[in-house]
Image: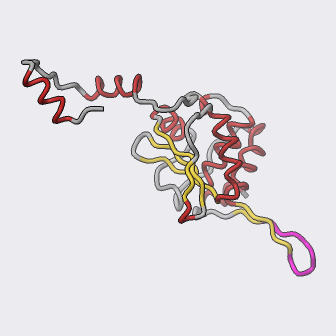
Amino acid sequence: KYTKNQIYSYCYHNKLIMKKLSKSEISKIQSQNSRKYHINQDYFKTWSSDMAYVLGLWFADGCIYGGKMFDITLHIKDKYILKRIAEKLGYEGNIQDCVDRQAARINFSCVVIYNDIISLGGIENKSLTIKFPNIPEEFLPDFIRGYFDGDGSVMRLKNNRLNSAITSGSKDFLDSLL
């Protein structure tokens, strides 16, 4: 709650020597103390139907960035999906409303989840280059259902038939999905 200048001033006036921390020491302190809201950081370590669904939704409408940030943004009418995901992840923080974009977002910082997403095939700036991940066969329908909830659609044609579609900016991803 104090500014850097206030801390420097306090140390100076009390003749205290400040120690410069190494990156590993800073990282250790941050991982112990910086989590504002609880999150199950091991969520993506074990395959389950729910985990595969959330991963599929992330592949469609999520992003990771900065070596630690995790984000899924959906249309505001799908905020209930983000609430369910927050429950599954054990996330106690707020789901943000992005009124100007008619969207809702779950966003948090967790290096462990970031690294797990990378190990499962996720990448930063994935829209045009993402590859279809290696999903255990028993969880493939859940992954596809999650992806469909993010980037799928169903349309009624003029002859009352239904047409469904899945979109992606990555041709490799769609070819592998097919």
Q: Is residue 92 left or right of residue 11?
A: right
9 or 127: nearer the viewer: 9
15 or 48: nearer the viewer: 15
Q: Main secondary structure of the magenta part?
A: loop
Residue under the point 10% across and 19% down = 17
Q: Find residue 134 and report its image quarter.
A: top right
Residue 21 magenta-highlighted: no
**Count of all numbered marks drawn on residues in the image:** 0
Q: Quadrant of the C terminus?
A: bottom right
Residue under the point 60% across and 59% down = 103
**Of all residues shown, which one is farthest toward the bottom?**
158
Q: Quadrant of the N terminus?
A: top left
Q: Is residue 16 left or right of residue 134?
A: left
Q: Is residue 132 left or right of residue 148?
A: left
Height in image: 35 above or below 55? Answer: above
Query: What is the magenta range?
Result: 157-164
Residue under the point 53% across and 37% down = 119
Residue under the point 59% across and 34% down = 91
x, y percent for residue 44: 60, 33
Height in image: 26 above or below 126? Answer: above
x, y percent for residue 168: 62, 62
x, y percent for residue 118: 51, 41
x, y percent for residue 122: 54, 46
**Of all residues shown, which one is farthest toward the right?**
160
